[in-house]
Image: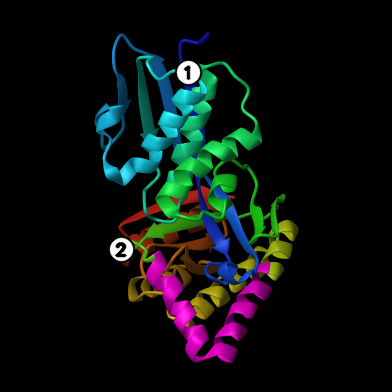
Amino acid sequence: MIDQIIGVGIAHAKIILIGEHAVVYKQPAIAIPLTNLTVTTTIRPSFQGQIIESNSFHGDLNELGANVEGLRQLILQLLIEFNMQNTPFSLEIDTNIPQERGFGASAAFATSITKAFYSFANKPLTEEKLKYFTDIEESISHGSASGLDAATVNSDDPIWFIKNIEMTPFKMSLTGTLVVADTGIHGQTMHAVNIVKNNLEEHYDLTWQKIEHLGHIAEKLRVDLTKNAATHAGLLFTAAHHELQSLGISHPKLDNLVNAALHAGALGAKLTGAGIGGVMFALAKNNDNAITIANALTKAGAQNTWIQPL
């Protein structure tokens, strides 16, 4: 029995600070929430139909396109969970999270939708249930998902992650501001993963040394984040970018934006996510410095920029 008139669920984006690609080989990674980029799902009763409304789609649930099959399957499973298969409703998704940019958009959407259904049904949502339903969407959209995106889009704190071993939130005391910039080129996850894999096959010792170095950088960065060592953290970000660059997974546009950020006074800068396009970020000393860096990135060709106080 549905007791509430409206159900609302909110989630936010995330980025990986450190550990891209090295995390595949059980090196540590750190992801942080981007709370300025959010998705809000609102469910309301309707007289007829099961209508989905978003920035890019308006229509019946059964008409959702194949590009969002994960979300459709998630909603179908939630309808079964609450015996709502024949219940008319309107589900509205409002978001400013760019998709296919490494921001964890699909996990954020799934988290938001799941929270909204539980809110609508006035039922308590456990972490286990949230993970279960989010995994439905993630497994369809991304195959074998690590769970890092799902954990971070529902966390207020950074997540320390080692594949199949550890996923732990921790407190961060770093003062500063992140500036995130989009190259306008879709990241190429599978291509980048295969490049690293091929490097290991052709030049194992050298490539493994780079992967381990990225792991050591992650360990040092975790200490910097907890001790507010912003200047040293910035140096580590830039060092990680150069290591990822040497692995062949950067892109001229990413490198151009990293250099522009550094020339504009950033403490450090690096690509984030898959690489070969996609997104980068810079660590600014403060908000004024962040605005200067964001303007420099726009002049250097960034398609969009976002500023996130830490």
Please give the name of the residue rendered at 39% of the width and 14% of the height, measured from the top-left corner: 87
Q: Amino acid at mark 2?
A: Ile
Residue 37, horizontal then vertical, whole percent: 45, 43
Q: CA distance from mark 1 to mark 2?
A: 42 Å
Residue 268 shown left or right of residue 258 in the figure: right
Q: Quadrant of residue 62?
A: top left
Mark 2 nearby-residue class (10 Å; few <14, some 14–19, many ≥20):
some
Q: Quadrant of residue 297?
A: bottom left
Residue 204 shown left or right of residue 157 in the figure: left
In this view, 30 is above or below 112: below
Q: Is residue 214 magenta?
A: yes
Q: Of 265 and 62, which appears nearest the observer?
A: 62
Q: Of 131 and 4, which appears nearest the observer?
A: 131
In this view, 142 is above or below 238: above
What secondary structure is the stretch in magenta mostly built from? Answer: helix
Residue 114, horizontal then vertical, whole percent: 50, 31
Q: Which mark is residue 264?
A: none
Mark before the other along the chain sequence, 1 or 2 = 1
Q: Give SS at disc 1.
A: loop
Mark 1 nearby-residue class (10 Å; few <14, some 14–19, many ≥20):
few
Q: Of 11 and 253, which appears nearest the observer?
A: 11
* Residues in magenta, as a range: 189-218
Please give the name of the residue rendered at 64% of the width and 53% of the height, measured from the top-left corner: 159
Please give the name of the residue rendered at 61% of the width and 85% of the height, measured from the top-left corner: 209
Q: Give SS at disc 2.
A: loop
Residue on which disc 2 sits = 185
Residue on which disc 1 sits = 83
In this view, 211 is above or below 179: below
Q: Amino acid at mark 1?
A: Asn
